[in-house]
Image: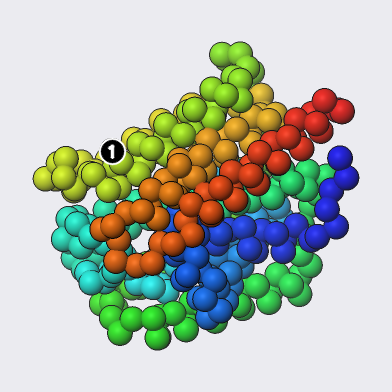
Amino acid sequence: MQESRVPPALVLFFLSPMIAELLSGSAPPVEFFNPAGFLILTSLYGSGAIVVRELVIRWDKGWTSLLILGAAYAILEEGLMVKSIFDPAWMDLGALATFGRWAGVNWVWAVMLTIYHATFSIAIPILLVELMFSSRREFPWVGRKAFRLLVLLISVVAVIGFAWLTPYRPPIPQYLGAVAATIALGYGAWKLPHQPKPRDWTRGPVGPRRLALFAFAATLCFFMLLYAGPFLTPFPIVMIVAAFCLVALVGMLLTDFGSRGLAESQEFALAAGALGFLILLAPLQEFDKTRTDNAVGMSLVGLSFLVFLVLLGRRIGRRSKVT
């Protein structure tokens, strides 16, 4: 099937914020499509996702480096720009405003949002766009000049967000620690070995349906931990350890599943399974009377993403039959 002539970087520029903010319900349609908000979100997420992917491609790295760079992006957004990692009054914290806060840092929130952004803001949008433009997934999508402009754009948005989004100013040592962590993660992603060769298959092929269910279950566990964790244990460290254990488990299983490389249908199943949870959650958010913002249109958002995944899945299926 012939691919679209639309530049893949442009698709990624809009898909990343649409998944991370719109589909998740963090920014419902009324907020997301507000001109000012739309400009900031696309500039932030879109630039971040493209920059991360271009670095991975140009450094000849793999998914581990991509996820580490995704974590660096998370700290840049949540720590350096919006400062939610430090701000005890950040609007979305809920119980996490006090649960896990120590030395001026919202530690539980920081860990959970780092995992979220690395996965849903960076990795999944990149994977979906690469599946849409499979003939170009091994190549850079922007030139050096455009890359530098994207870096400048995300830097400008981060500065604007820091200065005007909220009046809160983090303590200087903690803020410098976030800067150091961002740099260290970027350096670590760069220093990792090049794309590793697949190991021998250990358990045999895993069908797309099982992979989709696995991704759905992992996403369900993550969000249950995020929202219910503070009510299940009085010890924040337990929640942090649980989050890292979930990440380690998912990482080990994916390494085992893909020891000889995953087919496109399997890659798609993982992304679709993870997004499937958010799609099911979308209409529930619209009719959640406890929400203080306007969530009208979330059902349509979920339906739109469902149609998008169905069409992309069919396209990948036809492409697999041809090859």
Residue in view at x 45 percent, y 42 percent = 280
Can residue 71 be seen? no
Image quadrant in which the C terminus is located:
top right
Rendered location of residue 21, percent (x, y): 48, 61
Query: Horizontal placement of 125 versus 120: left or right?
Result: right
Question: Vertically, is 94 above or below 149?
Answer: above
Q: Which residue lies furthest to the left in this view?
A: 234
Q: Which of 295 and 22 is in front in this view?
A: 295
Residue in view at x 66 percent, y 38 percent = 310
Q: Which of 80 and 47 is in front in this view?
A: 47
Rendered location of residue 252, percent (x, y): 47, 29
Query: Horizontal placement of 117 versus 111: left or right?
Result: right
The crowding category of the residue bearing disc 1, from other C-alpha atoms within 10 Å (few below 14, some 14 to 19, many at least 20), is some
Residue in view at x 33 percent, y 58 percent = 110
Query: Horizontal placement of 10 versus 183: left or right?
Result: right
Q: Mark 1 points at which residue?
A: 242
Rendered location of residue 55, percent (x, y): 65, 58
**Image quadrant in which you'd find residue 11:** bottom right
